[in-house]
Image: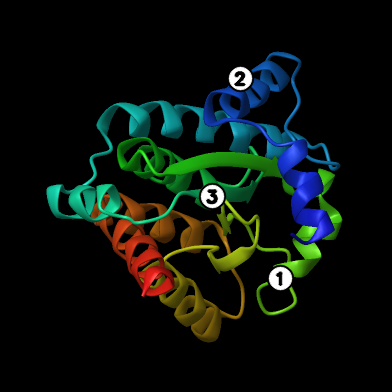
């Protein structure tokens, strides 16, 4: 196992611990991460509401549920996240539900800014984009693959917007949230399951 991965796992949080950590910081008027600002705090508050809703409403399709339960090995999904990240708020409830439903995957979450060494191993186009799901073989501790920071449809939406307007502004962020709303977590489920099935074959 790579040392940064082992270190991160040692300092990781369960989904419920992560949710509590973010909530407790909000009570102090703070967000997770090294940087503190009114904007980041507001994003965290918005994400808290979003995650509460998704935890109640998010469903894994029957077909995907079956595929998860039929995985041959046991895994850890180590996710790099932060409380202020809009994509993480949309994706973590799905990732958590998939892990729970599978009976074969343990979900562990770490904060990006506290795990810089780990983050540097999983950059996206040289950026510290999150969330990133790192797939670890539970038995051997070896890193098998990664997924993130967002499903292909959402990535394409942002890439196309940036090409057309040169920036990622509030409109782009709103469009992205609408994309997630309409997708209902299906793309994320399918992509993660395809990754797991590829790893097993």
Q: Picture quarter containing residue 100?
A: top left
- Pinpoint residue 116: horizontal percent, then vertical percent: 84, 55
Residue closer to the observer: 31 or 110: 110
Q: Which residue is mark 3?
A: 77
Mark 1 vs 3: CB contact within 8 A: no
SS label for mark 1: loop
- Pinpoint residue 193: horizontal percent, then vertical percent: 33, 62
Reading the chain from its start, which is encountered first: label 1 or label 3?
A: 3
Residue closer to the observer: 196 or 181: 196
- Return the residue found at the far bottom: 163
93 horizontally vs 17: left or right: left
For the C terminus, the quadrant is: bottom left
Mark 2 vs 1: CB contact within 8 A: no
- Pinpoint residue 183: horizontal percent, then vertical percent: 26, 57
* Residue at x 70%, y 68% (from the top left corner): 122
Disc 1 to disc 3, C-alpha distance: 17 Å
Residue closer to the observer: 39 or 67: 67
Reading the chain from its start, which is encountered first: label 3 or label 2?
A: 2
- Pinpoint residue 119: horizontal percent, then vertical percent: 76, 60
Q: What is the number of the mark on residue 123?
A: 1
* Residue at x 76%, y 15% (from the top left corner): 28
Q: What is the number of the mark on residue 20?
A: 2
Q: Picture quarter containing residue 146?
A: bottom right
Disc 2 to disc 1, C-alpha distance: 27 Å
Q: Is 118 located above or below residue 154 in the figure?
A: above
Q: Residues within 10 Å of mark 1 (few under 14, many from 20)?
A: some
161 horizontally vs 124: left or right: left
SS label for mark 3: strand
Q: Residues within 10 Å of mark 2 (few under 14, many from 20)?
A: few
């Amino acid at each position: 196992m790579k040392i940064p991965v082992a270190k991160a796992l040692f300092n990781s949080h369960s989904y419920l611990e992560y949710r509590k950590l973010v909530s407790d910081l909000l009570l102090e008027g703070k967000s997770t991460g090294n940087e503190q600002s009114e904007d980041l705090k507001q994003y965290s508050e918005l994400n808290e509401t979003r995650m509460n809703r998704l935890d109640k409403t998010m469903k894994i399709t029957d077909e995907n549920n079956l595929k998860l339960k039929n995985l041959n090995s046991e895994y850890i999904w180590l996710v790099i996240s932060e409380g202020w990240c809009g994509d993480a708020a949309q994706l973590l409830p799905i990732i958590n539900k998939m892990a729970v439903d599978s009976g074969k995957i343990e979900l562990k979450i770490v904060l990006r800014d506290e795990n810089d060494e780990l983050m540097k191993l999983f950059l996206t186009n040289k950026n510290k984009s999150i969330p990133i799901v790192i797939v670890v073989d539970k038995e051997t501790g070896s890193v098998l693959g990664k997924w993130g920071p967002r499903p292909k449809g959402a990535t394409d939406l942002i890439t196309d917007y940036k090409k057309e307007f040169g920036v990622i502004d509030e409109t782009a962020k709103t469009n992205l949230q609408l994309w997630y709303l309409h997708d209902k977590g299906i793309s994320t489920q399918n992509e993660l399951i395809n990754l797991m099935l590829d790893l097993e074959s």
